[in-house]
Amino acid sequence: MNIWSIRTVTALLAVLGLSLVGSGSAVAQEGSEEAAPVDLLTAARGAVLVEASHKPRDAYSLIDGDPASTWSIVTKRNPAPYVFTFELMAPANLSAVGVSGAGERPGGVVGGSAKTIVIEGAADPRDGAFRPLASLEAGSEGVSLAEVSDPEPVQALRFTVQDAQSPEAAFLYLAEVIAQGEMPLLEEADRFTGQFLTGRSTHIELKQDGLNVTGCYSENSGRSFGTIEGSVVDGVALVNWQSDQGITGTALLTIDSTGALNGVRYRHHSRSTWGGPPSAEAASLPCSAVQPPANPILAGLQKDGEVKIYGILFNHDSDVPRSISLPALTQLQEALEAEPGMVVLIAGHTDADGSDSYNQDLSSRRAASVVAWLTERGIAAERLGSEGRGEQEPVASNKTADGKALNRRVEVSVVK
């Protein structure tokens, strides 16, 4: 096995600052002129935590794409090894696996970053038939990777942390787990259709139609409700939610191999897990008997005067829409045709990777390209305005990979 460490902040961002807007199956930084390696082992790419031997709630931080958030444990009270099992969204041919070191921690904890790590893979996330993939001596800072020579695809990855950098360390820390390689995109037409139990008496109900996802949810022991609307982007659902009290936010959702819904939910910049297993008994939710709108963009513009669109995607460092954007662009065209007197502003938004000026220019060019696409198909230019807002108006954290994915969007608002 060949092992190497990447120590600079630039290299760390290139590996962990990932975007769902890529060229083909490639994933890249939003504000970078060069494509970055794909990290498949993030919630933004549909990865989920299967189990952890210690502190499982904290282990979700290992796949958030944020090297500043760490999993930690008191070593004397809980001696090694520490074992974490994750599931990729689909079977993948891996080229490298590794971790991000936690560095020296505040409070004088020296040598606490994880050191010796054994990484195994399995074709089936639930059958336990793991085989060795790599073993590495991780650096205390930055990203440490080991090449994978195993040609067989894997969907489950097990990381066993055996020790810290220093045997005297009172705490052990780990920042991120990483997997690079090629993974096919899932194209199941009704993958997100179903009802899921999120608590003892709370649910999420989703209906997928093509790349559109709509639905509703209950909370507060089933006493309050909200709506969900969004798009499937490269196998994950990027959605907007709104409570019946008018509170709004965003979420990223995926479905694991058991059929359970897994995701993260943002309200302002707070982040929490959101999901659960398929509901054994159907609950009666406000959207259960309601058919999704034929055109969610038109419905959003008519009801709220604005929509966040996640289905308009671009090649890396480009203002040319990807072919997968056609359904969303067509819905936007049809919405404007249905309301011939409507004048709208189309705004592009990016994550915070890269410079402010680069992101401002990129978002401006992308918004203008949407306007150009619409005018080429008969929408009058005087009905369309465009504006780039770069990274100025995030709807989720720019520290996590899933938050960055939710921040990259096109917004359409009614001017008159």
Image (spheres, rainbow, N blue to C red):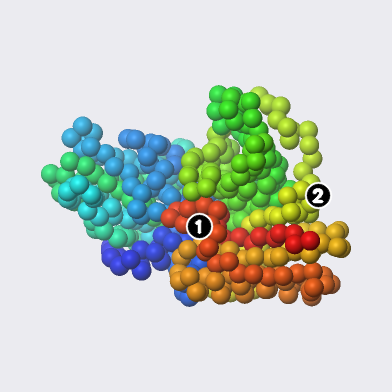
- In percent of width and height, residue 398 lies at 47, 57
- In percent of width and height, residue 23 lies at 57, 69
Tell me if label 2 and label 1 are in contact, CB under 8 Å: no
- In percent of width and height, residue 180 lies at 43, 60
**Side (left or right) of 270 relative to 295:** left
Residue 222: quarter of image: top right
Tell me the number on the disc at residue 404.
Answer: 1
Dot 2: what SS? loop
Q: Which residue is mark 2?
A: 294
Residue at (16, 44) in percent of width and height = 169
**Side (left or right) of 262 relative to 347:** left
| Comparing labels 2 and 1, the label whose residue is closer to the camera | 1
How crowded pointer 2 is (Cα within 10 Å; few <14, some 14-19, many 20+) is rated as: few
Kind of residue at disc 2: Ala
- Say if 79 sits above or below 316 in the image: above
Examine the rendering and report whether any part of residue 86 can be seen. Answer: yes
